[in-house]
Image: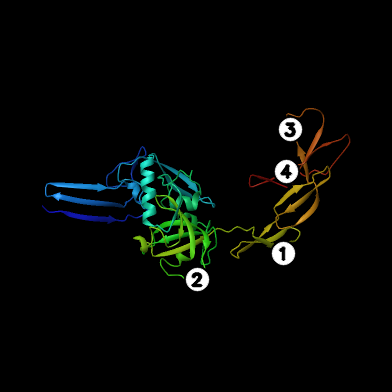
């Protein structure tokens, strides 16, 4: 009797392949949505019998579909700058046994990481990092590149907390995305770039959501993955600080050092029949008179005339023989302006 025990590992890519879809179902066997990884143990007790123990597709942090014939819906989400991004909705539901097994697999794969949310096949790393940071996120995203090619995010070489970290293989494929939640001091080990200098939260395919040191995840070479380098992406938030306020504009700075010049964005308070207080986030504060325009409401009867402030929307009823300077609504590019 010949006994042979072998363990085969195949690691699949995270990128989606061309598909043919008929009623939300893959139509051709050779048009699988994506390659997927698995672990298989083969035990040949004798030449006549082969026993295989193939883990569920959910056991792999890099897999989504369990081969061909999987049922799913296609949807669209949008980058902050409005570009369309295709996402998938898996109609299957993981059993509690699958969830427990996947949690266990992830914990064993990278014992240094901390599981913070259960395994699920509903959302993956790209969807969590770029679209929605919620365990209720229903979308699986295969290609997040539009987020950092349409200007919504910019590549940065000095990442900060809340910036995105992406893991690339030697061919330039983005295998994994996460969000930086802390920074470490010291000298990098140079495993997968300087990923070890950052604490990251990321979803591991259909496995769980983890907090981990940047290099300690299934996508880096230390844990059998193909990622060799990382890149960081930043979305500007021009509300960090302001300067050079004047009568109409200020300069707004992002934490990364970039700046823009913009008009004041006022909020209004202390509204009276004659004026209001305008306050901008930059600190600019002034008392302004109302900019009146005619106001009509078909539900308001009577012979009265009403005017509305175009800025703060204060409404005033004019008395008999009372007149105020009224500016009509001007229409430009289908938008009302003062």
The label shown at residue 55 is none
Residue placed under numbered mark 2 in the picture: 186
Which residue is rendered at x = 60% and y = 62% of the image? 255
Count neighbours of disc 4 (C-alpha within 10 A) and say few if under 14, some if 14 to 19, many if 20 or more. some
Give yes or no for contact between labels 4 and 1 (Cβ–Cβ under 8 Å): no
Residue 183 as seen in the image, left or right of residue 110: right
Name the spot of residue 18 as percent of width and height, x first.
34, 49
| Front of the two marks 2 and 4 | 2
Disc number for residue 244: 1
**Going by the image, does 121 lie left or right of 296?**
left
**Residue positioned 67% across, 61% down in the render:** 241
Location of residue 58 with respect to 195 vertically, above or below: above
Q: Nearer the viewer, mark 3 or mark 1?
A: 1
Q: Secondary structure at mark 2?
A: loop
* Tag 2 and tag 4, C-beta contact below 8 Å: no
Q: Position of residue 231 (x, y in %)?
A: 46, 63
Mark 3 or mark 4, which has the lower sequence index? 3
**In this picture, is 9 found above or below 324?**
below
Mark 3, residue position: 297
Labels 2, 3: front one: 2
- The coloring applied to the image is rainbow
Of the residues under marks 2 and 3, which one precedes in the sequence?
2
Q: Nearer the viewer, mark 2 or mark 1?
A: 2
Q: CA distance from mark 2 to mark 4?
A: 60 Å
Name the residue carrying label 4: 329
Of callouts 4 and 1, which one flags the residue occurring earlier in the amino acid sequence?
A: 1
């Amino acid at each position: 009797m010949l006994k042979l025990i072998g363990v085969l590992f195949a690691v699949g890519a995270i990128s989606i392949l061309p598909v043919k879809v008929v009623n939300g179902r893959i139509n051709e066997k050779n048009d699988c949505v994506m390659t997927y990884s698995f672990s298989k143990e083969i035990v040949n007790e004798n030449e006549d019998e082969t026993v295989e123990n193939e883990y569920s597709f959910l056991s792999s942090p890099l897999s989504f579909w369990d081969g061909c014939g999987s049922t799913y819906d296609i949807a669209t989400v949008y980058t902050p700058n409005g570009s369309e991004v295709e996402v998938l909705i898996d109609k299957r539901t993981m059993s509690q046994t699958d969830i427990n097994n996947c949690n266990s697999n992830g914990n064993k794969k990278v014992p240094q990481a901390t599981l913070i949310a259960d395994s699920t096949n509903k959302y993956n790393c790209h969807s969590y990092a770029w679209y929605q940071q919620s365990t209720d996120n229903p979308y699986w995203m295969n290609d997040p590149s539009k987020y950092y090619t349409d200007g919504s995010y910019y590549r940065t070489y000095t990442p900060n907390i809340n910036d995105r970290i992406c893991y690339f293989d030697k061919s330039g494929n983005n295998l994994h995305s996460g969000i930086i939640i802390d920074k470490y001091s010291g000298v990098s080990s140079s495993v997968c770039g300087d990923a070890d200098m950052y604490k990251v939260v990321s979803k591991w395919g259909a496995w769980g959501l983890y907090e981990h040191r940047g290099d300690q995840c299934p996508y880096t070479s230390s844990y059998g993955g193909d990622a060799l380098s990382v890149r960081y992406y930043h979305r500007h938030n021009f509300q960090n600080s302001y300067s050079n306020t004047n009568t109409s504009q200020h300069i707004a700075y992002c934490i990364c050092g970039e700046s823009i010049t913009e008009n004041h964005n006022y909020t209004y308070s202390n509204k009276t029949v004659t004026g209001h207080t305008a306050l901008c986030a930059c600190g600019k504060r002034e008392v302004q008179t109302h900019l009146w325009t005619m106001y009509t409401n078909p539900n308001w009867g009577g012979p009265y005339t009403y005017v509305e402030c175009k800025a703060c929307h204060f409404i005033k009823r004019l008395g008999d023989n009372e007149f105020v300077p009224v500016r009509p609504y001007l229409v430009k590019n289908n938008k009302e302006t003062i």
